[in-house]
Image: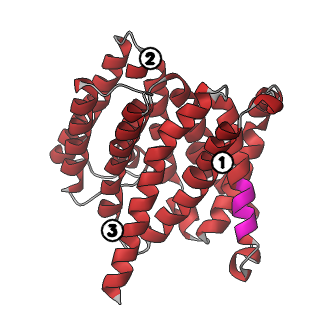
Amino acid sequence: MQNSKILHAHLCLLSAATIWGLMAPIGKAAMLSGITGIDMVFFRTTGAAICFWLISLCTAKTRNEKIPLRDLLKLFGAGFFSIVGNQTCYNIGLSITSPINATIATTSLPIFALISSALFLSERITWKKILGIALGLSGAWILILGSATASNAKAGSLAGDLLCVLAQCCFAVYLALFKNVISRYNTITCMKWMFTFSAVTTLPLTLPQVMQIPLAQVQTNTWAEISFVVLGGTFLAYLLMMHAQKTLSPTIVAMYNYVQPTVSSVVSVAVGLAIFGPSQGFSILLIILGVYTISRCGKSSHP
């Protein structure tokens, strides 16, 4: 029974990581069809908010769960860093860089999570952790430098890579500052409020842009790509990951993050959306070594 539960958790994590890996090239394809990064922020925040509200109404536990005002304010802050900051930076970054670079950037999250824990939670930093941080940041820096000198947009963009890395910094701050309030309530309850606050917060930025979309001219395949990003990459993948976290250790959960650039690279290169070169490969290697070094110290995080 226990082995079956563990296997189910692994399958959930593998599915979530695969969906996130597919989300980058599929989202990029939608952006090449005229959907901007700002548009995608609107679809992801609003669409996910609706989905989480609908699922919360299906069970009494989430439907009747009450949250005091002080904790709602904390959930607003959690949503600001984990969704507004993270998704705005990531989606705009993805719109101007390659999907491979965008997913490689996400693997740096455990590095920034450790830095945030040291800054905000006074977590002790050992020399081994410093080595891990140095390796991981070196990988991210090589990726960024490679994009700065790239003559082909399929090889990456300096501004896009920086935004994708900044997205990980925002999520790392969320992990360090809001763990306590998140652990007090049902996951779906937290997500519905965080996405609702995020949708409302980003509305002044996103709605004017979305209103300019010529809806009649948007092709069916583009709507399908947007639907996958919203329902798959923003709603379903989060649910799968949260379910798996209840069974597997944070270290195992974090290691599944490296499925993302693998899936993204294969699909992106296959359909001609990106170029995978030596700099991307070396970046992945350094980041993996960095996170592995940190995880050996007994502490790890998940993006």
Q: Earlier in the sequence, mark 1 or mark 3?
A: 1
Which-is-in-front pick, marks 3 and 2?
Answer: 2
Residue, disc 3: 249
Residue 122, horizontal then vertical, whole percent: 36, 50
Amino acid carrying mark 3 in the image: Ser
| Residues at marks 3 and 2, CA–CA distance in whole angstroms | 38 Å
Answer left or right for 265 relative to 231: left
Residue 85, horizontal then vertical, whole percent: 58, 38
Secondary structure category for the residue under label 3:
loop
The structure residue drawn at horizontal position 43% and vertical position 69%, both measured from the top left corner, is 244
Instruction: From this view, report whether residue 49 is shown above or below residue 170.
Output: below
Residue 99, horizontal then vertical, whole percent: 45, 32
Question: Are the two marked residues, 2 and 1, in contact with CB atoms closer than 8 angstroms?
Answer: no
Q: Can you tell which quarter of the image residue 59 is in?
A: bottom right
Amino acid carrying mark 2 in the image: Ala
Question: Are the two marked residues, 3 and 2, in contact with CB atoms closer than 8 angstroms?
Answer: no
Residue, disc 1: 227
Amino acid carrying mark 1 in the image: Ser
Q: Is residue 53 magenta?
A: yes
The structure residue drawn at horizontal position 44% and vertical position 27%, both measured from the top left corner, is 98
Residue, disc 2: 153
Q: Earlier in the sequence, mark 3 or mark 2?
A: 2
Secondary structure category for the residue under label 2:
helix
Answer left or right for 48 relative to 3: right
The structure residue drawn at horizontal position 48% and vertical position 19%, both measured from the top left corner, is 159
The quarter of the rendered structure image containing the N terminus is: bottom left
Residue 148, horizontal then vertical, whole percent: 37, 13
Q: Earlier in the sequence, mark 2 or mark 1?
A: 2
Q: Which residues are magenta?
A: 49-55
| Residues at marks 2 and 1, CA–CA distance in whole angstroms | 25 Å
